[in-house]
Image (cartoon, rainbow, N blue to C red):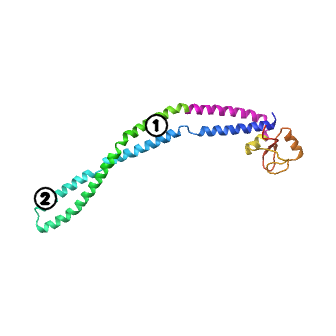
Amino acid sequence: MTQQQLLLRLKDLDEQTARYETQRQRNGLSAYEERLARVSEELSVKTARIGLIESDSTETELAEIEKAIARLEGSLSRSTSYDTALLKNELAPLREQKAALEDRALHQMLELEELQPQLPGLRASLLEVQQELEEARPEEQERLDNLTMRLEALARERGEVTALLPQEVVNVYAKTGRVDEIKQGRCRCRLEVPDHFQRQIRAGNAWVCNTCGSLIIQNLNP
């Protein structure tokens, strides 16, 4: 094979390698993992919220305030006119607190009624996604193994191709990765290629442009 043909093959091998590396970096399980994360997060948030509501002290506070109100109301029925005004002043804020606590308790009860029925469905969804993920793992591993074998084969052939090229050409290609065809006797950077180098190019060899570092060949299409 001429230098031109070897370079074209080298370029093709590197392009194939880049494509396979991109495919290998892609996570074929990402859709399952993302769904699993979403369901798990939703279940965790709602479970935590239910636990927070259930551990809330609203009912205890409400019971204590109701007792305090009952005591004051009992005292009010036996009080003098002077004491009545004082007791009413104490009752007013307690009744306001009671109303606020009752509103909070009602809101929490409604929230629990909404959240608790969702947990069984979320747990079932979580188990379903976990199962789908585990079932998909062997296929994904097979895909990765196939790509690894292809990449290893490309690497072996690349080593064989580079061994047939002059080291200078290999070094230049490693730096630039550019292989361009000569057009109207000029390099891609518009530098005119000397006649004796043009003859070498036509013979199938590559020429390294001293200006832009490109590897110039006769034609990019073998």
Of badges 1 and 2, nearer the viewer stands 1
Q: Is residue 169 left or right of residue 152?
A: right
Which of disc 2 and disc 1 is earlier in sequence? 2
Task: Please name the residue that numbered disc 2 is placed on.
Answer: 74
Q: Which residues are magenta?
A: 140-168
Q: Residue at x 88, y 47 (%)?
A: 194
Placement of the N terminus among the 4 image quadrants: top right
Task: Please name the residue that numbered disc 1 is placed on.
Answer: 129
- Check disc 1 and give the amino acid type: Val
Q: Is residue 132 left or right of residue 141?
A: left
Report which quarter residue 83 is drawn in. bottom left
Secondary element under disc 1, as helix, strand or loop, is: helix
What x and y, as percent, mark residue 117? Answer: 34, 42
Q: Is residue 113 magenta?
A: no
Residue 123 visible within the image: yes
Q: Residue at x 55, y 31 (%)?
A: 139
Q: Residue furthest right?
A: 196
Report which quarter residue 95 is drawn in. bottom left
Q: Residue at x 37, y 42 (%)?
A: 118
Q: Residues within 10 Å of mark 1 (few under 14, many from 20)?
A: some
Q: Residue at x 11, y 64 (%)?
A: 79
Magenta stretch prevailing secondary structure: helix
Placement of the C terminus among the 4 image quadrants: top right
